[in-house]
Image (cartoon, rainbow, N blue to C red):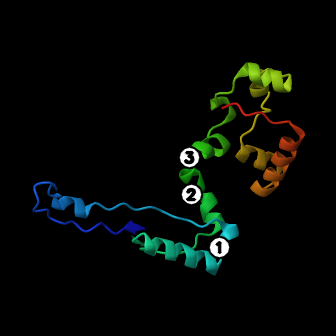
Amino acid sequence: LKRTPEPVRAASSARRPRVPPFCAMVKNSAFVFIKPHAVTDKVKDLVKEVFEKKEITITKEGSIEAEEIDKKKKIDQHYYAIASKATILTPDKLAVPADKFKDKFGLEWADVLKDGKALNAMGACEKFGIDASELDKMWAACKKAGDLVKFG
């Protein structure tokens, strides 16, 4: 996507400074995606309509299959702060407060790491032979039961 630059107007008035011509050349671009559950013709038309009103030009459209998104970790790169904790960093690289962990689970964080009982989301899916959707269901059940704690 590229935002159409605002027109540059030379100001002859002493009250309005002259806008340098290089300002008209500045363009930003972004990758915009519609989440899978929302991909409908109506939503795509709405996105186009809003972008047109904001003078944002769509330079390319397409679809990316789930396998490619997973293989190239496109979502992980987009949501790095979240993804780093869920899929990129291993549990030993996370800043988990040992005291809070022990208070919540009655176990020492160091022992859990040593015993290989801590997993990130990707590791949990591999170990239990499940996909992200199934892990999300398990997460929701733990949250509802009060078996989760946010450490950061």
x, y percentage for residue 30?
44, 61
Mark 3: amino acid:
Tyr
Of helix, strand and loop, which one carries label 3? helix
Nearer to the camera, 90 or 41: 41
* Residue position for label 3: 80
Nearer to the camera, 16 or 29: 16
Q: Which comes before the other along the chain, label 3 or label 1?
A: 1
Q: Which comes before the other along the chain, label 1 or label 2?
A: 1
Viewer-nearest of discs 3 and 1 = 1
Q: Mark 3 and mark 2: span between their CA atoms?
A: 10 Å
> Residue 35 lies in what quarter of the image?
bottom right
Mark 2: amino acid:
Lys
At x 81% / y 46%, what residue is drawn?
139
x, y percentage for residue 126?
76, 49
* Residue position for label 1: 39
At x 77% / y 44%, what residue is drawn?
124
At x 60% / y 67%, what residue is drawn?
34
- Contact check, label 1 and label 2, Cβ < 8 Å: no
Of helix, strand and loop, which one carries label 1? loop
Of helix, strand and loop, which one carries label 2? helix
Viewer-nearest of discs 3 and 2 = 3
Mark 1: amino acid:
Val
- Contact check, label 3 and label 1, Cβ < 8 Å: no
x, y percentage for residue 105?
84, 26
> Residue 29 lies in what quarter of the image?
bottom left
* Residue position for label 2: 74
Q: Residue furthest right?
A: 145
